[in-house]
Amino acid sequence: MEFELKYTPAQEAFRQEVTAWLAANVPDGVAVRPRTFEESYALYLKKRALGRALGVKGWLYPSGEKEYGGGGLGLDQIVVLEEETARLGLGLPPYYDSGGKMGAASIRVWGTEDQKKRFLPPIYTGAVRSWQLLTEPTAGSDLAGIKMTAIRDGDVYVFNGQKIYIGSHHGADRYWTIAVTDPKGKRHQNVSWFMIDSATPGITTQPLYMLSAQSEGETDEFGHKNIIFFDNVRVPADCLVGGENNGWKVASTHLEVEHSGQGNIRTNPVWIALLAHCRTQMRDGRPIIEDPEAREKLAEIYSRLEAVRLLSTRNFWMVYAGEKRSYHGSQTSYLRKTTNLWLTKAIHDLLGPEALTSDALYGAMGGIAEMQQRRGIVEQHPGGTTDIQRVVIARRLGVGAREPQQAGRLGEEGMARKAAVEA
Amino acid sequence: MEFELKYTPAQEAFRQEVTAWLAANVPDGVAVRPRTFEESYALYLKKRALGRALGVKGWLYPSGEKEYGGGGLGLDQIVVLEEETARLGLGLPPYYDSGGKMGAASIRVWGTEDQKKRFLPPIYTGAVRSWQLLTEPTAGSDLAGIKMTAIRDGDVYVFNGQKIYIGSHHGADRYWTIAVTDPKGKRHQNVSWFMIDSATPGITTQPLYMLSAQSEGETDEFGHKNIIFFDNVRVPADCLVGGENNGWKVASTHLEVEHSGQGNIRTNPVWIALLAHCRTQMRDGRPIIEDPEAREKLAEIYSRLEAVRLLSTRNFWMVYAGEKRSYHGSQTSYLRKTTNLWLTKAIHDLLGPEALTSDALYGAMGGIAEMQQRRGIVEQHPGGTTDIQRVVIARRLGVGAREPQQAGRLGEEGMARKAAVEA
Amino acid sequence: MDLSLSDSQVLIRDSVRIFVQRHVPRAELVRQAGAGEVWDPAWQTLFAEAGWTGALVPASCGGLELDPLSAALIFEELGRGAVPSPLLASSAMSVGLLLGCAESEQRDAALTAIADGTMILIPALRQPASSWKGVAATGSSLVDGLLTGVKVFVPFAAAATHFLVTVEGGLAIVPAEAASVRLLGGFIQAAYEVTFSGVAVGALLRPGAVSFDHSLSVARIVAAAYQVGGMMEMLDMSVAHSNTRVQFGTPIGRFQRVQDHIIRLLNAMDAAKWAVYEAAWAIESGRNGVGRSYLACSTACDSAIEAANAAHEVHAAIGSDPRFGLTLYTRISRSMYELLGSPGWQRRQMADAMGW
Amino acid sequence: MDLSLSDSQVLIRDSVRIFVQRHVPRAELVRQAGAGEVWDPAWQTLFAEAGWTGALVPASCGGLELDPLSAALIFEELGRGAVPSPLLASSAMSVGLLLGCAESEQRDAALTAIADGTMILIPALRQPASSWKGVAATGSSLVDGLLTGVKVFVPFAAAATHFLVTVEGGLAIVPAEAASVRLLGGFIQAAYEVTFSGVAVGALLRPGAVSFDHSLSVARIVAAAYQVGGMMEMLDMSVAHSNTRVQFGTPIGRFQRVQDHIIRLLNAMDAAKWAVYEAAWAIESGRNGVGRSYLACSTACDSAIEAANAAHEVHAAIGSDPRFGLTLYTRISRSMYELLGSPGWQRRQMADAMGW
């Protein structure tokens, strides 16, 4: 076994190209935590501009096919790109477009040629930002229980209903969603998947401030989620992807992407900040890390975070190597969520009330500790609650005398494409 | 609130009588842990003899009606009796007859006058020892799924089937059990409850050695469970208690007793031994308790055990005061079981490998630690697994939009009598 | 043995419950939290009228001189309502510390003023960049009789009329005007930095026969009771949600995983509740109440976090929507976790108090 | 990055798996445990023939000189089969300690004898009434060059041809005949008291460049791998049982509580497994293998207990019936928990090794 990525000369050459381009194009302060809503918005605009510049290079969605505006790059290059952007505190796409990432995955698997040509290039080039609209007030874990309808009327579908816990701040250009197209149809066979222009008349948005406002990986205190209302919204019929009443299968593609994550090989940034804090901050007249009790707690925290990191690395490799996964994605998601919640108390025990405040003077880890206290709670639920992740794990393991399930049920072609998308 | 039992002059007078009698009648060595099977058997015989002597006084089943051989005593006196026997490391009945205790509860609620006259006096006077025969190889948590049949044939029922994880060592005189009396009947409405003479022809017994051999509160390493086979066993029809096909309701009486326990106000003897061990045993040249790390672990252990003790005390009081219980019994059972399992690792961490051996020289706490390591595992399951206890708690709480259940569903009369039995 | 409440205890509990229902609706707390308001000063008048400000003050100083359990029930109900107020800090922590001091006119005057509601005395104890090692470790040095220094994580400091500060030789009561206070932002509730710059402290309150940490025994119990009340409410919310929220065609309470979250919450709550009740009885009846108060408070602190986490699992996304109200309790579970020392520190104190 | 096994690693793993299937059926282990037999000496011959006794011995001394991961896979398969043997103590712990000594003829002779199976060298380290503070803390004093003293919890001491003992100045190899051994009864598996009464120890093996605790890095990894193998088997048993055991008319694996026990087991196993694999790679590639070996071993020790507990929940009563076989693994999970120091101690060592 080899746990580190090794690089070919070709990769190192590509790295040179990437670092040079990034040095020239990434604006200052793009990894800084904003302190006001205005700063947050300015930062968002910076990132959008950077995203478009990356899009021109084909580096925003490097795995996307060139003909649709993607980079057409192989895994070798994608890995280098991800590493170099991560080094700058960014990511690909630069954090603001997880909706585009997942939506594009579904479109690549299920879209017609025409739809790929219409929908993918704006995403791949950074022209648009997309949100996923899945949860409804009465349909959270039970996604198939959605009530929003999309009734065919000639060349359009007419949408009525609402979606909740959507997106973040600063808006989006595209929404993709599932809606009931056959109100009398059977569960799982009555919904369809749509890509919608967010400017379509009849759509209204209402902000929803959660305990943790951040989303999409942002360390941004000033964000929010949204409730989105559809009131006789007329969406062209050619925005339906994957066939009428086939939406559940289409959704299984992006749900797999969302539930499983793609694995990663990064060290938890909270850990990095925590260790640095304990090394540099004094308590009772000595660096925290010299306190035996603190040291022990740190070692315990590290051990648990390492389990998450190692299983993420395993997943990363499985995707990288094209290994078939089963429970692995949900296992890591479950462990990550439960470990992060456990971590809130562990850090609180280790650092005391300094972990609870974002105060510039007293807030531990520059406020990251305080943020983790809230996010550790809030992030239990999006993208599949811990309870739902366990449903998936049990099914994939074949517990309960059911046939063990493979990840995603996409079929071979879908699996291969998905792997490519996720890599 | 008052957390201690206070005693009236009448109680203190009764205590005098009890202690005097016990001093005169309890043989030496009755609370000693046997080291061989022979010692175990000798001890058992001692306890049986003591039980019969207590029976003559009406003190073996002090709450039982006098007309059936019980003591006819009130709670005030029963509490004193329990305290004084507990002080000697005994209990009422002296540990060997939990089957009699539970079976008698059902007979008191469901038996005819004739049955009470036949079945209760031998139990109350210590003449017989009884075992409960409930679990079958394919019916553990799902007790209603039993397969043993008892088919009416004239004046007898003919039993065929087997029961597993039964009783302990040294045999029993009576078995009580449930069996299917209507093989075509609906679940829960097809079983009946019987009191059976263990000497009935066709019954054979096979010992079953578990990881932890002890049962019925004994600190006895040489015991075992049993498998009991019924091969055309003919049982007189007047041994059926509570009516044909009414066995599930009858069972609910003793299951309530078993699941809930009766609460108690004793300090966990493992804790007492652990604290004494840490105070007296040296490690690294000082008493264990002077090691700050050990001290911290002890405090953590104490905190968790105190939660169990406090909820047991609450249950004791609820029975004592005739308060209606709902989830309380199963909650305490669940907490006790899960805490004891947690305790295995906590003690292991605190004491090291000394907790794993019964060696006379190195075994911690005179071997009690080693025994707790095994029993903490084994005792998760008898009398309702932790999973089943949680089923009961949820139902009693009314979780899941079900009507909250009261304990036992016995009706007022049954509840009152049960309370008397359990007190 | 009798684990029921006395009639007067039921009466007190019910009166607080009615107060909370009438004056502190959850919607108002949600609004306040959203608006960044810390508490409503109008409540203080009502607390004083009801006598709760003097719940633990001796009758000789105009207080109700309640037994610890009765006082705990007041705080249990306030906790159930998630009512934010300086009552715990002033009328339990400071009163406890004052009662631990040697008798003096100054002491009795302060107790009287707390009881009648004219004084809100907030203990300002915690030192920056220091772990909590007990009240005695928080003493500030005086230079020429003047107090200079910073205290942090001081609860409800903005509500104070006075601060109670440990200095060499005893406790000082400092008028709030002589200090500057600053709210600390973030998840923590109503925690402040308090800065003293050359404040003349005057006569000190001298220590009494027991340590200040012992004097806080009742404060630990009522603080724990406040958390127990919060857990009771979270349990009710969770059971209700599990019965009304339908997913996959069935109330979610039918799913064992959801049941198990609720059972965790129930067990955490009951463990803390009975530890509190027994500790209150232990103090009242003179049975190592100090050790049991540490047990009760550390159990409640651990339990409250467990309970809040479990409640969030039951509620999923809506639980993290501050408008729903659950986060009021979540925030308290975190904010009070170390108010009287971390649970680990408290357990160490317990071991000592138990005489191990 | 490549997390797959090499062809030769697959070959080794499969050969051990076949050995276990052929020679160590579970029924036989159940019988042995029931009869109080500790291990089957005949296996030693087979281990030596296969070269596993010299898995970690340099080729220059006749060993296979396997990389740590290959060695770990041998132990993983033995652990999966719950095979009791002195292999871990002799061919991993003692070999590690020997390799940590300065080179000498005596050292190489011992390594050669271990590899060819003629020597079973058991480290006798643990002192009575002492906590584990690392190998260096286990040294016995010599009086006039003679070793007198008692070691406890020595694994598989009855299988030893020699004991390895720390004394002032280095390690001593003592013939087993010179000591008396006594099996410690109870739940612990194959643990002995070893008594030395005035044994002449001869020439010592001198310490090498690193501490003895560092020398045990590979031993920690293979010990952890043995536990991982056990967890793999417990997972398979639990999944199988959840699918075949029917209660309430349905396989119990349909109940979320049963699923959750299995998921706990799975997570405990995978956390340990990947910590072991990465630690093996870290040693092989020179990346703080010491720190990572502590991480792997402490994780595996904690995980094994968690996994066994979860497996017992799945199996309920039948799991506690020793004839069923699960208790073989339960017992190992306990017996190996502190074999190389408690998980807590190991984590402290890890923190040091990580350079925090």
Image (cartoon, coloured by chain):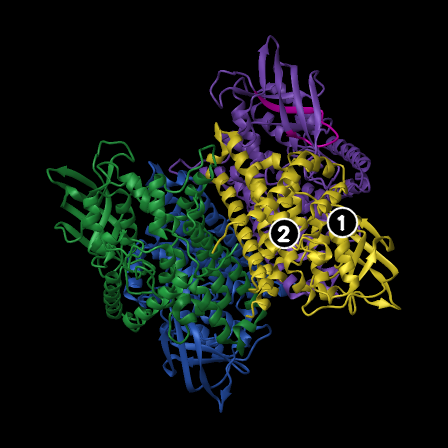
Chain colours: A green, B purple, C blue, D yellow
Q: Amino acid type of disc 1?
A: Gly
Residue B208: image x %, image y %?
69, 31
Q: Is residue B387 above or below residue C141?
A: above
| Region of the chain picked out in magenta, as a range | B165-179
- Between residues B229 and A8, which one lies in front from this camera angle? A8
Does the magenta-highlighted stretch encompass residue B172? yes
Disc 2 marks which residue? Answer: D71
Residue B89: image x %, image y %?
73, 44
Residue at position x 57%, y 66% in the image: D351
Residue A134: image x %, image y %?
27, 47
For this orientation, the residue located farthest to the bottom is C144
In the rendered image, is residue B350 in sight? Answer: yes
Q: Is residue A63 above or below residue B15?
A: below
* Res. C30 image quadrant: bottom left
- Between residues C75 and A275, which one lies in front from this camera angle? A275
Do the dots labelled 2 and 1 sit on one chain? yes
- Between residues C157 and D169, which one lies in front from this camera angle? D169
Q: Relative to residue A81, is residue D118 drawn left or right?
A: right
Disc 1 marks which residue? Answer: D117
Q: Is residue A153 above or below residue D193?
A: above
For this orientation, the residue located farthest to the front is A9
How packed mark 1 is, by other alpha carbons closer than 10 Å (few <14, some 14-19, many 20 or more), is many
Q: Amino acid type of disc 2?
A: Ala
